[in-house]
Amino acid sequence: MIRTAVLHGSGYVGRELIRLILQHPHASLACVTSRTYAGKPLHVAHPALRGQQQTQFTAATEFDASDIDVVFVAAEHGKGAASVRALIDRGYTGCIIDMSSDFRFKDASKFESLFNVKHPAPELIPEFKYGQPELFAPYSTRYIANPGCFATGMLLAIWPINQCCAEANASITAITGASGSGIRPKPTTHFPERDGNVRAYKVLDHQHLAEISQFVSSGIHLAMVPVSGPWTRGIWGTIQLKSPLPEPEIAKWFKNLYDHHPLIRLWPGKLPELHYAVGSPYCDLGWVMRDEDLVIGFALDNMLRGAASQAIQNMNLLTDLPITTGLVAETH
């Protein structure tokens, strides 16, 4: 069994990670840390786990990683790197999957300009690889920076265009549910403000746009409008551009790139619907083309494919397991 630990596991991503680890056939949950809930059962923070798990939260200062194979770091941005450095300084030699933005950027100055905080461990950035499983695995490292939720959908959707043409102007609109803002209440996630409302934020300036811009060619210009939607979980978005190729060629690129990836589902000739992606580990991609106008759609669960289940994909790859292990039912 793969012994795992979840650091800072009292939030939404921590909850999903715990649930997925508990159902994983080759992994066990050895420890979950939390400053707030140390010494209390997991169900105090995650009521759905009542009766399912006897584990208690552990204080970070009491966490012993000596026999842990994989550590998931579910800290907020700016805190993940500090936890990682503390782990390594104590001699930890296993795998680390960081869920924060702290190691997603190749340049510490970019991180610092986006989050207005000094990077806690810039010397470790080269050790981490961006963990988009379908695009960048296999990895030559034990340390993975798990992608952001918007970034996951946008990068997978634009990648075929990035591969088949050198230049494009792409306009992105992506709508996310309230859980994308984290477990701490904020004015913009307050139910009366969110229900029945659609609100744009960080227009043309979202950190996930900067995240994926590191990987697309310089000739592909991306402009993004992120939007808060009146639901709890899930991201639905579109990318609109002038197509460099006729529709059959676009379809060929998508199919050649993704047909052999079991956790990407293609919707040729239509845009995917959010309802079918929520609660699943899949990213759904579809496209519609009229004349030269191409619209690529993407849908995913921000807490699963945009965070926790993608981290499990990465754990599976780091431990030489099939990528879908613990995420979809095995067929016989």
Image (cartoon, helix red, strand yellow):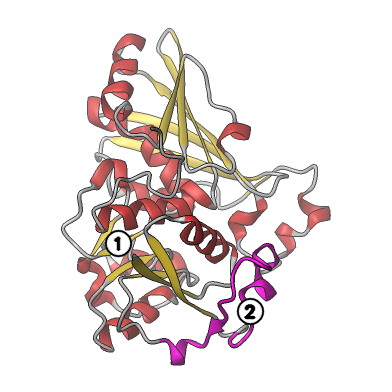
Evaluate if marks 1 and 2 touch, with contact meaning CB atoms under 8 Å apart: no
Residue 2 in the image: above or below residue 222: below
Residue 41 is marked as 2
Q: Which residue bears the numbered disc 1? A: 144
Residue 147 in the image: above or below residue 35: above
Q: Along the polypeptide, which appears first: circle 1 or circle 2?
A: 2
The answer to which quarter of the image holds residue 316 is bottom left
Residue drawn at 26 percent across, 87 percent down: 89
Q: Which residues are magenta?
A: 38-63
Q: Identity of the amino acid at label 1?
A: Ile
Q: The C terminus is located in which quarter? A: top left
Task: Between label 1 and label 2, give the one nearer the viewer.
Answer: 2
Secondary structure found at label 1: strand
Residue drawn at 60 percent across, 88 percent down: 39
Residue 305, position in %: x, y?
47, 47
Residue drawn at 29 percent across, 55 percent down: 130
Q: Nearer the viewer, residue 325 or 205?
A: 325
Residue at the far bottom: name it.
Answer: 61
Residue 81, position in %: x, y?
36, 75
